[in-house]
Amino acid sequence: MISAVEELSLDGFQIVKSEMFLHLPRKADPTCTIWPTKISFSRMSLSALNNCEYVRLEVNPSTKCLLVSPTPSSDKDSIRWIKGQKEHSVRNMESKLFGDEIYRAWGLDPEYNYRAVGRLVSARNKIMLLFDFSNAENWKTKKVEKS
């Protein structure tokens, strides 16, 4: 038995544009995540910079941007950001000192972690990744209880 179907006015309803659902999952974007004690990058970050082994990080305190630049291992500020020899992946780079500095400089809440999506940029004829943390995704840090 079918009950009566109520007639509905469509006044006030707006069509949702299909392009709102076309964004690729976050796995397709280069991302950088900052915790109070470490920094990490997604596998897509590594791919975006052609699987380079060493990078240099540059921070802009006023714009809350982080620049990742491929660099030779001989660069005095180079950081090996990959792990593994055959199958490369990006490692978590532990550094409480970096975390303390970046959280202080950018006025971040140490009870939160922050993630930003990166984009390729060019400067001085070099391709780099720029991560803008001025409007970063954030979530509360899980505290480990001490026994």
Image (cartoon, rainbow, N blue to C red):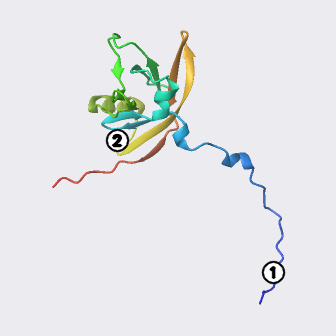
Crowd rating for badge 2 (residues with CA inside 10 Å; few <14, some 14–19, many 20+): some
Secondary structure of the residue carrying tag 1 is loop
Residue at the image position 50 percent from the left and 28 percent from the top = 47
Q: Distance between the residues labelled 1 and 2?
A: 54 Å
Whole-percent x and y of residue 44? Answer: 50, 33
Q: Quadrant of residue 99?
A: top left
User: Which quadrant is the C terminus positioned in?
Assistant: bottom left
Q: Which mark is residue 110?
A: 2
Secondary structure of the residue carrying tag 2 is loop
Can residue 133 be seen in the rendering of this structure?
no
Whole-percent x and y of residue 3? Answer: 78, 87
Can residue 91 be seen in the rendering of this structure?
yes
Compared to residue 63, the image places residue 42 above or below, namely below
- Residue furthest to the front in view is 86
- Residue furthest to the bottom in view is 1
Q: Which of 94 and 8 is in front in this view?
A: 94
Q: Is residue 106 left or right of residue 130?
A: left
- Residue furthest to the left in view is 147
Q: Nearer the viewer, residue 113 or 62?
A: 113
Residue at the image position 47 percent from the left and 23 percent from the top = 67
Q: Nearer the viewer, residue 82 or 68?
A: 82
Whole-percent x and y of residue 26? Answer: 54, 42
Is label 1 or label 2 in front?
Answer: 1
Residue at the image position 47 percent from the left and 25 percent from the top = 62
Q: Which residue type does callout 2 highlight?
A: Pro
Q: Which of 144 and 23 is in front in this view?
A: 23
Compared to residue 94, the image places residue 24 above or below, namely below
Q: Which mark is residue 5?
A: 1
User: Which quadrant is the N terminus positioned in?
Assistant: bottom right
Q: Are marks 1 and 2 in contact (CB under 8 Å)?
A: no
Q: Which mark is residue 71?
A: none
Q: Which residue type does callout 1 highlight?
A: Val
